[in-house]
């Protein structure tokens, strides 16, 4: 149990410090004046219209999924490219297989029309 004492001490100190900082900012922080423009739901210059619970078009979700997929691709490609000179042919072809699967997914989304906007 003595092994966990530093972790417990760290949690107590960090919790106390964060509570202290939050409390001080709440007590001494400046509060802006209530402006009807600032407290409105939207600050883009347009009055809110429609229901907030209206359904979104599925294409928004498809584009976001595509972004996540290709963002992850870059996250895997960068360290692989850095260490490519140290690897063997297995690491090269495994990444090519990974890129091939991502390309198939991209072509599938393209053929389904997920990238077409009307």
Image (tube, helix red, strand yellow):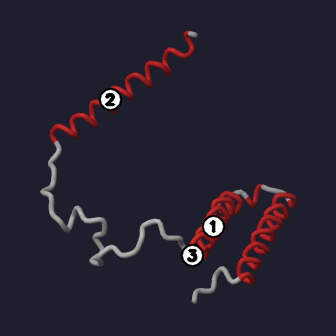
Question: In the figure, is residue 14 to the left or right of 58?
Answer: left
Q: Do the residues labelled 1 and 3 touch (CB within 8 Å)?
A: no
Q: Distance between the residues labelled 1 and 3?
A: 14 Å
The residue pinned by badge 3 equals 57
The numbered disc on residue 17 is: 2
Lower position in the chain sequence, tag 1 or tag 3? 3
Mark 3 or mark 2, earlier in chain: 2
Pick the residue in front: 40 or 63: 40
| Residue 25 location (% of width, % of height) | 22, 40
Q: Which of marks 1 and 2 is nearer the N terminus?
A: 2
Q: Quick one: quadrant of the N terminus?
A: top right
Q: Which mark is residue 112?
A: none
The label shown at residue 65 is 1
Q: Residues within 10 Å of mark 2 (few under 14, many from 20)?
A: few
Residue 105 is situated, as x and y percent measured from the top left of the image, at: 76, 72
What percent of the width, then of the height, locates residue 37?
A: 20, 68
In the image, what residue occupies the spot 67% across and 64% down? 73
Does 110 appear above or below 6? below
Find numbered disc 1 in the image and state the secondary structure of the residue it sits on: helix
Verify CB contact (< 8 Å) between mark 3 and mark 2.
Answer: no
User: Alpha-carbon distance for marks 1 and 2?
Assistant: 39 Å
């Amino acid at each position: 149990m003595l092994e966990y004492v530093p972790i417990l001490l760290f949690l107590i100190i960090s919790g106390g410090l964060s509570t202290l900082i939050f409390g001080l900012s709440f007590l001494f922080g400046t509060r802006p004046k209530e402006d009807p423009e600032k407290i409105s739901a939207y600050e883009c210059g347009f009055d809110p219209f429609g229901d907030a619970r209206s359904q979104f078009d599925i294409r928004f979700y498809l584009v976001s999924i595509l972004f996540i997929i290709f963002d992850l691709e870059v996250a895997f490609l960068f360290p692989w490219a850095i260490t490519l000179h140290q690897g063997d042919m297995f690491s090269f072809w495994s990444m090519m297989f990974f890129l091939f699967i991502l390309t198939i997914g991209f072509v599938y989304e393209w053929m389904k029309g997920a990238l077409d906007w009307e």
